[in-house]
Amino acid sequence: MAALDETLYPIAVLIDELKNEDMQLRLNSIRRLSTIARALGEERTRKELIPFLSENNDDDDEVLLALAEEMEAFIPYVGGVEHAHVLLMPLEALCSVEETSVRDKVVESLCRIGSQMREMDLVNWFIPMVKRLAAGEWFTARISACGLFHIIYSSAPEMLKMELRSIYNQLCQDHMPMVRRSAVSNLGKFAAKVEYAHLKDDVMSIFKGVTQDDQDSVRLLAVEGCAALGKLLEPQDCVERILPIIVNFSQDKSWRVRYMVANQLYELCEAVGPEPTRTDLVPAYVRLLRDNEAEVRIAAAGKVTKFCHILDAQLAIEHILPCVKELSSDSSQHVRSALASVIMGMAPVLGKDATIEQLLPIFLSLLKDEFPDVRLNIISKLDEVNQVIGIDLLSQSLLPAIVELAEDRHWRVRLAIIEYIPLLASQLGVRFFDDKLGALCMQWLQDKVYSIRDAAANNLKRLAEEFGPDWAMQHIIPQILEMSNNPHYLYRMTILHAISLLAPVMGSEIACSKLLPLVINASKDRVPNIKFNAAKVMQSLIPILDQSVVEKTIRPCLVELGEDPDVDVRYFANQAILSIDRVMMSS
């Protein structure tokens, strides 16, 4: 009797916890389903646990979501794939819940289970379930059904396949827009499983009806379907059946549909091929670039480089470049920003001459745009133009604008320029850099914004790595020595940060003779923040300097700081002393 009670115990506990008022307890119970199933064994899991879960599907969304997640990995606990069909019962009940995230997870779990089921079980169990869902009274069941057809279609007998295509057609014409949306968004997956003859006729007939739907939310999903179906069709069929739909969509009365076309245009071009793109889609794209709605122009502008890569240089110059010029002075800053983020990529397509004549003036106008995001997007892509026109022309035309932006009132723009400086330095070479940009790099160390000062210190390190310690000794170190006596403590702190970054690059000798005295001097500063930062810098110098220098110069200084009235100064000084002791012990 005791043994019998023991076998009943897991299911009894589960029942109690699943009926508990505390949602967390119910959730924990669901999360432990696999453990309970192992305790019950395969047969009792099939006969007791699964039916119980099927009946208890009226719960909080979080609990139902957890149940759907658990079920997808439950096949081993019910006796393997030959019994996998028993898992369909609890999941079918969850297909009708209102919460979208639960339904999506249920469909995902059903797809996982269906992909492992035997063909005969799919025909006997899975297909009838899908048919029940597709004919369900609640629209939520019909929505769920749309995501399952691609799992079952290949396994169905020929007559059943015809019925499934017919059911899917009905779902695409459902009176509820949400069902039609689900059917359209899953059409690509379903179409991939359909035989080519039926794809060309039945599926394309379904799709054509969807593209004329009165709801723009359905039509905009059909735009994605164009790309998916286009890849499945032969090139000739694609041009005949998909191309006219894309062209119509590009003139749709809803701006959301046109926005979707602009966003998906590159994928649509890939689907129809290069020749139809040049003849039919270039005019459609030009219309989108000149659309009345700013959102459509933003999406179209963001794809300008990708689109130009499909065309030859002549077509791009004739058709796309005039639109780009218009967009560079568009009334919407977001359109100009989208254009600025990709326009640099047009340079390799157009070639050197067209870039110099046509694109450079547009770059310059965008570099002087009143909105910082536009300027920022141009700066971050300058290297793409440099590869086409060469550094001499780039420096003559764009460098004055870069110098101007280095003092921009928006700190993010200044930050973008700083981050671009090492790349520019490597391209310009040391002599040109010293003449034009050297002074700027030191000037940023005294910026009012911390992020700029921090980036400037990192910039000096990268420049020292690029041009070598000798160059840094000549151009950076003297100016750092000069700035170390700045009356403002924040700027003195930036110099300490710069020293900690430069020391490993400069090497032991320069660090000892030039940088260490500055740090020792800073440790006697009147501001506690400077003193404890000096202690941190000394700690970073320990591995670089000779042991004798550490013992004779750094340790006495740290011992003195260890007796400072400020608690933070004492703490960091003691941490540095501990580091010295660890180095001594290891050596």
Image: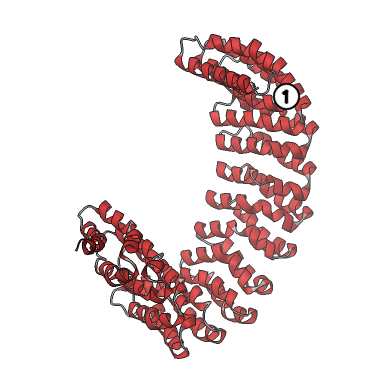
Question: Is residue 239 positioned above or below 484 on the image?
Answer: below
Q: Residue at x 77, y 26 (%)?
A: 471
Name the residue located 41 percent from the left edge and 71 percent from the top edge.
80
Vertical arrangement, residue 89 with respect to residue 298, above or below: below
- Quarter containing the N terminus: bottom left
Determine the secondary structure under disc 1.
Answer: loop
Q: Residue furthest bottom?
A: 159
Q: How many marks?
A: 1
Is 401 drawn above or below residue 499 in the view shown?
below
Q: Nearer the viewer, residue 104 or 425?
A: 104
Please tell me in which quadrant of the rendered image residue 6 appears. bottom left
Give residue 36's quadrant in the image: bottom left
For the residue pair 390 and 578, the one nearer the viewer reads as: 578
Quadrant of the rendered structure where residue 317 is?
bottom right
Residue 273 in percent (x, y) is at 66, 73
Q: Which residue is mark 1?
A: 507
Quarter of the image where the C terminus is located: top right
Q: Callout 1: 10 Å neighbours few (<14), some, many (20+)?
A: few
Looking at the picture, the colour scheme in use is secondary structure
Give the x, y percent position of residue 585.
61, 20
Relative to 241, 430 lies left or right: right
Mark 1 residue type = Gly
Q: State whether residue 229 appears in this view.
A: yes
Residue 260 picture location, percent across and down: 51, 64
One can see residue 537 in this view: no
Q: Position of residue 581 (x, y in %)?
A: 58, 18
Is residue 506 rendered to the left or right of residue 6? Answer: right
432 or 64: which is nearer to us?
64
